């Protein structure tokens, strides 16, 4: 039996973890805001958002605002649960003697 839990491969990507971390604190965020906060390119961010959406961690809503496309992302209940589990797993790695 291994001492450490396996880290969630969906969240173990730096950019995907950044996206979910932002959404944990804001619940809903525009694509542009996430891009600015993460420093990601639009293309890479779009790919990572798609992966999170396919995993069920976030929902994506596309609409128009003042005739411009707007993409909104929000974290799902599953996303919140997986983030909490991921943080808990990381704590085990950081303090292995505490468990």
Image (cartoon, rainbow, N blue to C red):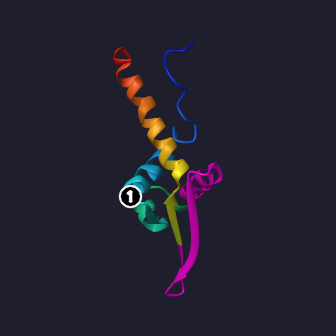
The residue positioned 51% from the left and 68% from the top of the image is 72
Residue 54: x percent and y percent?
Answer: 65, 52
Residue found farthest to the top = 1
Q: Is mark 1 on a helix, strand or loop?
A: helix
Is 55 on the left-hand or right-hand side of 35?
A: right
66 or 5, nearer to the observer: 5
Vertical position of residue 91 compared to residue 68: above or below: above
Residue 25: x percent and y percent?
Answer: 37, 55
Which corner quadrant holds the N terminus? top right
- The quarter of the picture where residue 10 lies is top right
Tally of marks: 1
Residue 71: x percent and y percent?
Answer: 54, 70
- The quarter of the picture where residue 36 lies is bottom left
The residue positioned 44% from the left and 40% from the top of the image is 84
Vertical position of residue 88 compared to residue 40: above or below: above
Which corner quadrant holds the C terminus? top left
36 or 63, nearer to the observer: 63
92 or 34, nearer to the observer: 92
The residue positioned 53% from the left and 56% from the top of the image is 45
Magenta stretch contains residue 58: yes
88 or 65, nearer to the observer: 88
Vertical position of residue 78 compared to residue 98: above or below: below
Residue 12: x percent and y percent?
Answer: 51, 37
The residue positioned 52% from the left and 49% from the top of the image is 79
- Magenta span covers which residues? 43-70
Magenta stretch contains residue 68: yes
Residue found farthest to the bottom = 66
Which residue corresponds to mark 1?
37
Vertical position of residue 45 compared to residue 93: above or below: below
- Label 1 Cα neighbours within 10 Å, binned few <14 / some 14-19 / many ≥20: few
């Amino acid at each position: 039996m291994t001492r450490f839990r396996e880290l969630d491969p969906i969240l173990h990507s730096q950019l995907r973890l950044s996206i979910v971390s932002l959404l944990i604190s804001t619940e809903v965020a525009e694509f542009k805001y996430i891009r600015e906060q993460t420093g990601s390119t639009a293309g890479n961010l779009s790919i990572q958002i798609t992966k999170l959406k396919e995993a069920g961690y976030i929902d994506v809503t596309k609409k128009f605002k003042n005739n411009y496309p707007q993409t909104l992302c929000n974290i799902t209940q599953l996303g919140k649960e997986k983030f909490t589990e991921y943080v808990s797993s990381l704590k085990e790695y950081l303090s292995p003697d505490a468990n």
